[in-house]
Image (cartoon, rainbow, N blue to C red):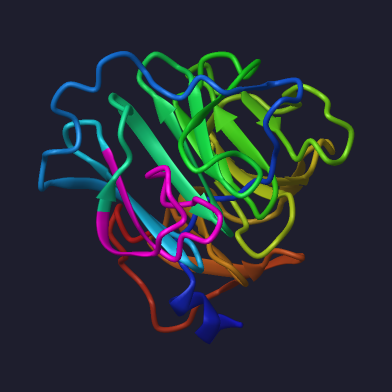
Amino acid sequence: MLNASRRYVAGLAVLVASLGVAGFSSRATIGAAGGCGTSKLVEEVSIAKLHTCARLRDGGVKCWGINGNGQVGDGTRKHRASPTLVTGLCGITSVSTGGESTCVSVDEGSVRCWGLGFADAPVEILGTGPVVRVAMSQIQACGLRANGSVVCWGPPTEDRRPPWTIAITDVTRLVGSKGKVSQFFARRADGSIWHWVGSDAPAHIPMAPARDLSCGIETCCALLEDASITCWDPEDPLPAVVPGLSDIGPYGL
């Protein structure tokens, strides 16, 4: 498991939803996109199994890879071997991929998603409230609000309910387990790590205070305050320190 952790220390989550149900809108654009998407400087990259997306410094988003369900977001089902602009989007503050979908948060607090269950171009998720970052598991998504609360949504094939609030506060980092259907992990301001599945109440994972947190397909890892790394299986969160790693900097994950 620990060897796998070195291969899977990045990731944010995925969801499946459908158009025309409560909580989803076909409105795709965010005003005039202006020059967003022309920058060659990348602020964030999110990698899924079949596609990848990058958030650019100018607030645009480009995606590439397998595009069988529109996860690249360019309005087609054509596979893209090079970064392709997602048109009509600007002011993007975070991007998250997983499975065959993509979600982004926008600087005015809204959320847009595309791919499997959505459309071949971005659609708005309604009822989330202002979101500053998105995180995706395999078929569910959550958003981190500026006040440290968390809202989640999807998939509508279950009960078509609107987005719901998770019973947790003071969250500073939110990630989804890409290999799991609806499992999420969060770091609170005091450094504690919590996890939940679906709409369940979050449970605390006993470990030393953490600086940062990341999940991949089979493993989650945390950068601890003492600059060591601890990792665990998302289905069995029993953290174990990774031997031979120490003095990891603040951007180790």
- Residue 7 on the magenta segment: no
The quarter holding residue 171 reads: top right
Where is residue 99 shown, x and y percent of the image? 58, 59
Question: Which residue is pictured at 65% across the width and 46% down the height?
Answer: 15
The region drawn magenta spans: 61-83
Where is residue 70 shown, x and y percent of the image? 50, 50
Where is residue 137 shown, x and y percent of the image? 63, 51
Question: Which residue is pictured at 41% across the width and 41% down the height?
Answer: 95
Viewer-closest of 231 and 21: 21
Viewer-closest of 88 and 134: 88
In this view, 181 is above or below 158: below
Q: For residue 237, say whether it is visible.
A: yes
Where is residue 214 shown, x and y percent of the image? 49, 56
> In the current view of this chain or complex, which residue is farthest to the right?
159
Residue 10 vs residue 188: left or right? left
The quarter holding residue 78 reads: bottom left
Q: For residue 191, say whether it is visible.
A: no
Counting the numbered discs, the total is 0
Q: Main secondary structure of the magenta part?
A: loop
Quarter of the image containing the C terminus? bottom left
In this view, 220 is above or below 197: below
Quarter of the image containing the N terminus? bottom right
Residue 117 vs residue 215: left or right? right
Viewer-closest of 172 and 217: 217
Question: Which residue is pictured at 33% across the width and 30% down the height?
Answer: 92
Residue 186 vs residue 94: left or right? right
Question: Which residue is pictured at 25% across the width and 56% down the height?
Answer: 83
